[in-house]
Amino acid sequence: MTVNVPRKTETVIVGAGQAGLTMSWWLQAAGRDHVLLERRTRLGGGWQDRWDKFRLVSPNWTASFPGYAYDGADPHGFMPRDEIARRVADYAGVIGAPVVLGAEVTKLSARAGGGFRLLTSQGQIDADSVVVAGGSFHAPRIPPVADALPSRLVQLHSSSYRDESSLPQGSVLVVGTGQSGVQLAEELHNAGRHIVLSVGTAGRVPRRYRGRDIFRWLAGLAVHGEELGVTLPTVDDLPDPRLRFAGNPHMSGHGGGHDTNLRRFAAEGMTLIGRIDDVDGERLRLAPDLATNLARADEFFDARFRDLVETFIARAGLDVPPDDRQPFAFDPAEPTEVDLAALGVNSVLWTSGYRMDYRWIDLPIFDDHGYPRQSRGVTEIPGLYFLGLLWQHNQGSATLFGVNEDAAYLARQMGLRITSDLPVLPIPN
């Protein structure tokens, strides 16, 4: 239900995407007076900002929210952009979330007498507590080397890309091999474009492992791992806090879901290159890291997740098929430099991620990387919480299924009394 900005409420949720709406369900279950402020004029969250052919990389069954479990006909399919955006928008109506659309928060500060004051594009509101549910993807992150590239090139960040017509004819330099980069490179390659792909450090995971989609295992670890004594790595396990911003391991939800393998991309005709170190006119000087990054991508699942999944399977007593993955052996050439004009490159697609932008929060809670100081969403400032951050607790925190786990934790930390049945993610076998 759409409402107006009240002058005062118990709790303000900033953001009415999936994270904010999930928190709203918990607050409603406890009878807590609250309102959601959404800067967009239309519900659907950040999904509606994706490119035209975008699909979820997680299966449809993961789009199960508290009070709104997925009950569609294709639980193992992968929703396109408009469907997941519509599902998030519908969720607001299903739970009767008190949402104010077009209400951008321009400042959040502490009140002298306690609580918080929020200045918005629709007026001022005071609250006893605030849950910031704006996620981690705010402003496009484009490396400084972009300024040195030839001016003739059309440069787009993935946030501005919609379809192939967004780019001029010719080869495309795609920079970054996280989930978006690999999927867009594949999409453009299948459209007949020659792709020059600058390979980053993101790993890859198999689409299916031991007869189940990889998200069957990741969600199992996130939701049921604790009771079995085996869980996803937490943020405290990261050797460097900057790894919170690393690209997500890549795979695809297109074509019914499939693996994405950079070596196979090279074998099929893409030109793989290392990190761009320097630019001299049309020539790119490259770091000698291509072979290392390809090896890292190959080893990522086995190094990070395989033992956890195997322990989960054993302790849960699951009868599943053996590991039937087949390695793909192809070693592409590793150039030290390339000539963009000679390769016919006329455009650059930056799939280099995003940076956080919480400049509107006028409170001393951010570390040197601009990340809020918090423990599973609870900050050092009483009454201020975050939800939906990358690595808020573990690698699942910013996923469709991980948000509710963190929301449930916040509900307990807020002292909410929940009277209705607790939601359970329907994880298929």
Image: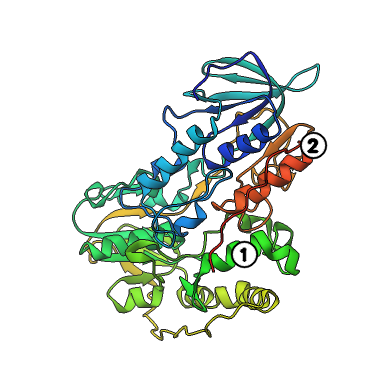
Determine the CA span between mark 2 and mark 1.
27 Å
User: Above or below — where is 200 with respect to 356?
Assistant: below
Helix, strand or loop at label 1? It is: helix
Q: Residues within 10 Å of mark 2 (few under 14, many from 20)?
A: few
Query: Which residue appears at 40% of the width and 83% of the height?
Result: 331
> On residue 105, which mark appears?
none
Can residue 206 be seen? Answer: no
Q: Position of residue 371 (x, y in %)?
A: 65, 44
Q: Position of residue 323 (x, y in %)?
A: 52, 84
Judging by the rendered image, the residue that carries numbered circle 2 is: 415
- Residue 86 picture quarter: top left
Q: Which mark is residue 220?
A: 1
Question: Going 68% across and 60% down the picture, which residue do you hit?
Answer: 240
Q: Is residue 86 left or right of residue 269?
A: right
In the image, is residue 367 above or below residue 62? Answer: above
**Amino acid of disc 2:** Gly
Query: Which quadrant does the C terminus fall into?
Result: bottom right
N-terminal label among 2 and 1: 1
Q: Is residue 38 above or below residue 229?
A: above
Quick check: 15 left or right of 27?
A: left
Give 306 or 351, whichever is nearer the viewer: 306
Dot 2: element: loop
Q: Residue at x 35, y 65 (%)?
A: 256
Picture coordinates of residue 111, whole percent (x, y):
75, 19
Colour scheme in the image?
rainbow
Hey, which quadrant is residue 302 in on the image? bottom right
Q: Is 376 positioned to the left or the right of 264 in the image?
A: right
Q: Mark 1 packing: few (<14 Cα in 10 Å), some, or many (20+)?
A: many
Point out residue 427 in the picture as x, y percentages from the top left corner. 56, 61
65 or 161, nearer to the observer: 65
Question: Looking at the picture, which amino acid does disc 1 mark?
Answer: Gly
